[in-house]
Amino acid sequence: MRRLVLLILILLPAALFAQKKTGAIKGILYDSINDYALQSASVTVYKQADSSIVEFQLTNTQGEFDIKNIPAKTALYFIVSYAGYRPLVRNFQLDTLNMLTNFGKLFLTHQGKDELDEVIVKAVQPLRMNGDTLEINPDAFKLDSNAVVEDMLLRVPGLTVWGDGTITMNGRKLEKVYVDGKPFFGGAAQTATQNLPKNAIEKIQLYQEKDVSKLTNTEQKTDSLYSMNIKLKGDKKKGLFGKIGAGYGTDDRYTGDGVAQAYDKKNQLGIAAGINNINKEEGTGENAFMENTFKSNFRFFYGGRGNANDGITRRTYGNLKWQHSFTESDNSQFYNRFTTDYGFLNTNSNITSNSTNVQPINDYRLTTLNKNRSINENTSNTAKFLYENRKKFGNFVNISANYVNQYSSGTSAASTDMFRNDSTAVSRTNSNSYSSSNSNNFYMFGWLRSNDFELRDDPRKNFSINFGGGYNENVSNRGTVNTYESLVDSIYTNTIDRKYNNKNKSYNANIGLNYDGFRQFLFGIYNFFNINMSLINNISFSRNEQDAAAFDLDKPNNQYVINRQLTNTNTLTNFSYNPALNFNKSFNKSVWGKYYYWLSFGLDLRYQFQTQKNESSILNRNIDRSMNTFLPSLNANFNYQKENAFRIYSYLWANTSTQLPSIDQLYPIIDTTERYNIIAGNPFLKASKVQYMNYNFDISRARPNSKSNYGVRLGFNFNNTHNAIGDSLIYLRDSSGRSIRHLINVGYQRNLSANLNLNFSHNINKKSTIGFTYIPSLSTYIRPGYVDSLQSTSRNFTLSNNFNLLYNLIDKFNISIGEIISTNRNHQSNSKQQASAIRSYTTTSNINYFITKSLSLNTSVNYQTNTAANRNAEAFTIWNANILYRFMQQKAEVKVSAFDLLKQNRNITNSLGYNFASTTVTNGLQQYFMVTFSYYPRKFGGGGNRRPAPPQGVMMIRR
């Protein structure tokens, strides 16, 4: 398998870059009167025979254009257009002896206000700059009548559509995708780009906009997002689309789903429902609107694998989504709307798992073998509400509310066998249990901000308020029969038959006030060195009430009696007040056409007043304590953009916080059914102080006409905890493997993580693109502690490397090949045992081959090798395939699917903690074949006799 992948990686680039020889044209555009360069003018090359578009480009900051891939021996002409100037036309033809034509300086003349050109030729502009917005004209792309927006985007230079639906422009990710200035059925890009027909689009706009999700009042460019707005044609402002499908297969496997979505100028309404027993999680619940799209160039095999811990699961779901806008505005920055969501989900899971857990203990090691069989059912009802009102002049109001009702029940049977040095059995545990719970959760959050879009003449009126509150209740019942047997002491065997009834309630509320005009309030017209000052106040309150009852079986009387050690009531109340004074200073400089930079520094001087009171029926758990702490934080932002080169964004944030030990760490309630890991509290534990730092660096290419683009994101997180709560593990001398975990304060605990996201794409020609992503991540932590009274520091190191190569030949073929290499290692400083380590190697490939416009083939291969906790390596290959046929104008689909053709499916999960390594093998679906039929209803426009708007970007020019 690896040799095959290597062969593909070697041969693919050679095949891709063997291109037909073409030429180029170049030139520089100037204003005819003032003799200055014209940036972002549109230059489009057409064939003289039929006026079809050959290539197009926008001029750079120096007014230059350099258009490649121009065919030789073909009669051509190009048109230069720029707002306020007369179009310029030049005829030309390249010959094989001179494949480069330099037109030198070209001068554009101003067009009079009332000047009309004689109508000779009609030309369509693919791209144009409208102020700071790049506009793409769909009418310039001649595609199939069933083409969707994604089909067009694949043909735009500098724009890359990745296999997961992510869209990047010149290496920079498009964070927001709107339709007529509004989020489209949740805002996922593929919901719009894979559903909306290309012929319904008037234009597509790419621009920067302020990130209004931030509560701060800054208007700096570091708060901006790169966004896309899909503007619909006037007669396509309403539409209906969706999907209904059903499938049945071998081994009694089935799936069925339905999605209906409708929209008009003010409303979006979506309904989704489905059921399956093929472990298909993708495309269910809220994701139903995102995954069940009409057309995608990058299809994947869904169903079969699911989550590694799902076992065999049946899912039933239903979702309703409604968004209403009170105005017909298509401005993504100013709106007045609400969104409501309702979701129902029921899962039934049958799970069988076998786990191996290895713990190195000084001069020996403990190995635990766990077997578990469980049947679980979970039902949830979720309701969400969001109201947003943002005006250009006025307050910004945002109110959201979430409610979740969840019911779950389950039964399980488990056994545990513990061995010393893998050979000597020391103890055994068997348990049977049942459980049920019902919970209700409600939370509301809101904020109001003044001076939202522009700073007013009087900054003293600049403020923001945020508030939140929630309620949670949970009622649970549980029962267990637990038998422990010591194999080193033939006499000791113990069985506990216990029931639990628990009731929990919690309340929380918080309010914050930020006053951003504090400098003007104190100093009036004096600018205080241009340092902005804000006054911040936050108050929070929470209360948690627990009522726990436990009952043990009295065998002689065969009845349950109350367990007074576990039965208790507990109420925890927290109050916190956090006043702060914020200082912010910024610097910026720009030279038009060359560069721009912006730098800012921020400092928060924060003080925390915190009180905590715990009231309990257990005497020693009644505590009343308070703590006052100074918690400063700082941040720095840097934004630099060099025209026609690159852009950089860098961000640094550091803060401190404190954490009081919980009541269960001070005075835990010990349940004797926890056989192997007993926690001993420590009433003398001190509060921990956490120092946290985060750094992010982002660089991407900013050259509009480049065929190659890149983007790099780098992130670091560092966490240092003083007086951290650590462990002193004492293993009992009966050699049973049981331990007591004493909680202690240790001098420090440190965590460091780093991640990199690198993407590179290259447009080989108008039809083919190659892309590469590399995503490594690293994390390490150090946790001092003790094992059997000897100091032992746990050091954990995790490294993951994720490579992916994508090649796309538009409308014909695409392939993605990936490799994931993960290593996790843990070592105890005083242990004589070999360091614990787990490794996994995963090779993936996914191929889509479009045989005809109606027939396509998808196949995926997943090859995985695991080195488990017991140091044994396991390998398996999962091969899946789909073949799809579309008919009835592409609205009907028949799909034949095959899962696990090689019959090797395994669900293996590896994990590594600070003193253990664990491997779990869970049951999963085996090979099945399925036939699915789907229908995609689609209707866009209608509802009147209004004539459609003329195509955008059309010029009437002389030739």
Image: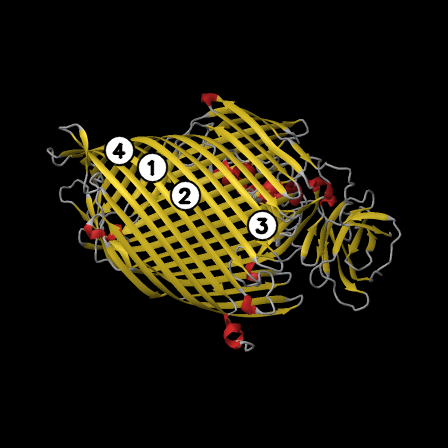
Which amino acid is tagged 3? Lys
Q: Residues within 10 Å of mark 1 (few under 14, many from 20)?
A: many
Amino acid, disc 2? Asn
Of helix, strand and loop, which one carries label 1? strand
Q: Nearer the viewer, mark 3 or mark 4?
A: 4
Q: Which residue is mark 2?
A: 441
Any mark on residue 920, and which?
1
Please indicate, yes or no, whether residue 531 appears anywhere in the rendered image.
no
Most distant residue in the left direction: 491
Q: From the viewer's perspective, is the residue at label 3 or at label 1 nearer?
A: 3
Q: Which mark is residue 479?
A: 4
Given the image, on which type of amino acid does mark 1 rest? Thr
- Decide: marks 2, 4 in contact (CB < 8 A)? no
Sequence-wise, the earlier of marks 3 and 1 is: 3
Label 2, label 3: how far apart the Cα atoms are:
30 Å
- Side (left or right) of 382 relative to 957: left
List the residue tagged with mark 3.
176
Sequence-first tag of 3 and 4: 3
